[in-house]
């Protein structure tokens, strides 16, 4: 079985492909790949989320790395993925490992790698690990137990949660939020973000306990999963709802009316807040499936805009190399210049709370200001469950040959990631998911909302 990295790490079904043996293999291959790293003598850190067996998987991985002669700092409890990124950078470590499969259904677990700068590991490094895995028949994992390695100081526990909380105290205007009267409700979705925001600002917390089944739903902050918090907002007169995914690197925002604020608008709101109120500068990087609204804002402010393939590893790479103010993707992942070249749902949620406290306006009012200035952008995504990779490839090829969709003439194509069809007032993107057996179909239109028409027509063309 070939272990391959997808859009964001390696993910697989527990007890199927995600086994202790396969985790040992990928840990050993990673250890070999970075033997010559300039910081390897400083060690690495390993964290884990609230999923089934995540703690045990993390200990297994730590044992493999420590047997390879690498000092391991293992978090003493579940943590968010951004915590591992933060520790990797601030502790001057070679890299970080996070045991999580983020927003995937409960039956999955995964293995994410974070580089020394605190961002997602780039594709060039991941290719090296995959080659070692493919070229090696057997690995020698060593014979020392976790307990022996811990006793010898090769594995050391670290309080990652407290380190993360202390870091946020210095980056967010905590007093401004707490003195503003902004009423905040936060849904942890049973994930590893629980219990952190509570220590800094006054919030009402939902689903803030460990439940490896995630209540029977996937811990993904997309519109279909947000009814629970929306109803709470309407009943409790909250000013903002904040939702994070399973490992708390992604975010969803709900306004005071209980309405979902799509990731395109959250991107736009934070971008303009950073420019106008925080007085910060730098370029902007967006994922390929992100809104043209961001392009219009960048043109308005004379800011350089970069567009990269989908996957935050591409955004992270650019944030490390260039002066980037903000990097964001369609799925709710946002990285900010004054924090990390990495997504962080908790941090970004608190930035939204800070924005409301500073601007003294309702979220719906801030959105209206954006729309009044730049126009209305209508955005929608659907996912089709397809396990046949050949079928996905065929449908993407079919897309390339289309001349019209829902009566809209195709004016151009872009194949940076999948296939994007361009219309006079919008676009359609078809691509295979890098994290789940899905074909993702995205569309955006301006002026008039034709997203449903486009999606219905493309499904008919695909016979889905």
Image (cartoon, rainbow, N blue to C red):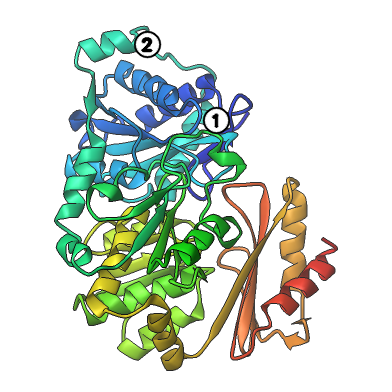
SS category of the residue bearing label 2: loop
Residue 422, horizontal then vertical, whole percent = 63, 81
| Rendered-image quadrant of the C terminus | bottom right
Badge 2 crowding class, 10 Å Cα cut-off, few under 14, some 14 to 19, many 20 or more, is few
Mark linked to residue 178: none
Q: Is residue 118 visible?
A: no
Residue 458 quadrant: bottom right
Q: Is residue 260 above or below residue 6?
A: below
Badge 1 crowding class, 10 Å Cα cut-off, few under 14, some 14 to 19, many 20 or more, is some
Mark-to-mark CA distance, 1 and 2: 20 Å
In the image: residue 411, left or right of residue 161? right
Q: Is residue 174 visible?
A: yes
Residue 51, horizontal then vertical, whole percent = 48, 33
Discs 1/2, front? 2
| Rendered-image quadrant of the N terminus | top right
Return the residue at label 1: 134
Q: Nearer the viewer, residue 23 or 123?
A: 23
Residue 311, horizontal then vertical, whole percent = 48, 56
**Lower position in the chain sequence, tag 1 or tag 2:** 1
For the point 44% across and 71% down, which residue is it? 255
For the point 73% across and 72% down, which residue is it? 455
For the point 58% across and 28% down, which residue is it? 14
In the image: residue 404, left or right of residue 19? right
Outermost residue to the front:
235
Mark linked to residue 142: 2
Q: Is residue 369 above or below residue 286?
A: below
SS category of the residue bearing label 1: helix
Are the residues at dot 1 and dot 2 in contact (C-beta closer than 8 Å)?
Answer: no
Residue 462, horizontal then vertical, whole percent = 81, 65
In the image: residue 442, left or right of residue 61? right
């Amino acid at each position: 079985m070939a272990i391959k990295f997808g859009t964001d790490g390696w993910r697989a079904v527990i007890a199927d492909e995600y086994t202790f043996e396969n985790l040992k293999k990928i840990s050993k291959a990673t250890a070999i790949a970075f033997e010559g790293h300039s910081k390897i003598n400083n060690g690495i850190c390993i964290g884990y989320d609230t999923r089934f067996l995540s703690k045990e998987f993390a200990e297994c991985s730590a044992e493999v790395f420590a047997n390879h002669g690498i000092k391991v700092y293992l978090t003493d409890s579940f943590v968010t993925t951004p915590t591992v990124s933060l520790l990797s950078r601030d502790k001057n470590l070679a890299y970080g490992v996070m045991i999580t499969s983020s927003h995937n259904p409960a039956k999955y677990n995964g293995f994410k790698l974070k580089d020394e700068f605190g961002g997602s590991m780039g594709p060039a490094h991941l290719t090296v690990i995959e080659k070692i895995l493919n070229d090696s028949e057997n690995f020698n994992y060593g014979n020392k137990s976790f307990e022996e390695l811990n006793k010898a100081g090769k594995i050391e526990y670290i309080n990652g949660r407290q380190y993360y909380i202390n870091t946020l105290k210095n980056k967010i205007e905590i007093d401004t939020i707490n003195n503003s009267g902004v009423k905040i409700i936060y849904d942890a979705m049973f994930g590893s973000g629980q219990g952190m925001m509570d220590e800094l600002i006054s919030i009402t917390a939902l689903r803030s306990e460990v439940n490896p089944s995630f209540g029977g739903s996937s811990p993904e902050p997309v519109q279909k999963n947000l009814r629970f918090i929306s109803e709470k907002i309407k009943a409790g007169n909250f000013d903002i709802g904040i939702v994070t995914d399973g490992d708390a690197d992604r975010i969803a925002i709900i306004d005071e009316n209980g309405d979902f604020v799509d990731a395109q608008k959250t991107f736009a709101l934070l971008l303009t807040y950073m420019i106008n109120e925080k007085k910060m500068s730098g370029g902007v990087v967006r994922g390929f499936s992100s809104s043209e609204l961001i392009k219009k804002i960048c043109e308005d402010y004379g800011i350089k805009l970069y567009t990269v393939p989908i996957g935050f590893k591409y955004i992270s790479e650019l944030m490390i190399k260039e002066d980037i103010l903000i990097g964001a993707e369609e799925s709710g992942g946002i990285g900010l210049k004054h924090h990390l070249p990495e997504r962080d749902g908790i941090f970004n949620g608190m930035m939204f709370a800070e924005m409301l406290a500073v601007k003294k306006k309702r979220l719906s009012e801030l959105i209206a200001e954006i729309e009044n200035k730049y126009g209305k952008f209508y955005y929608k995504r659907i996912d089709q469950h397809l396990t046949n990779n050949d079928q996905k490839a065929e449908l993407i090829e079919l897309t390339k040959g289309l001349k019209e969709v829902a009566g809209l003439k195709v004016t151009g194509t872009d194949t940076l990631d999948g296939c994007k069809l361009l219309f006079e007032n919008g676009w359609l993107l078809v691509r295979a998911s890098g994290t789940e057996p899905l074909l993702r179909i995205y569309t955006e239109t301006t002026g008039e909302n034709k997203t449903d028409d486009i999606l219905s027509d493309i499904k008919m063309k695909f016979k889905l």
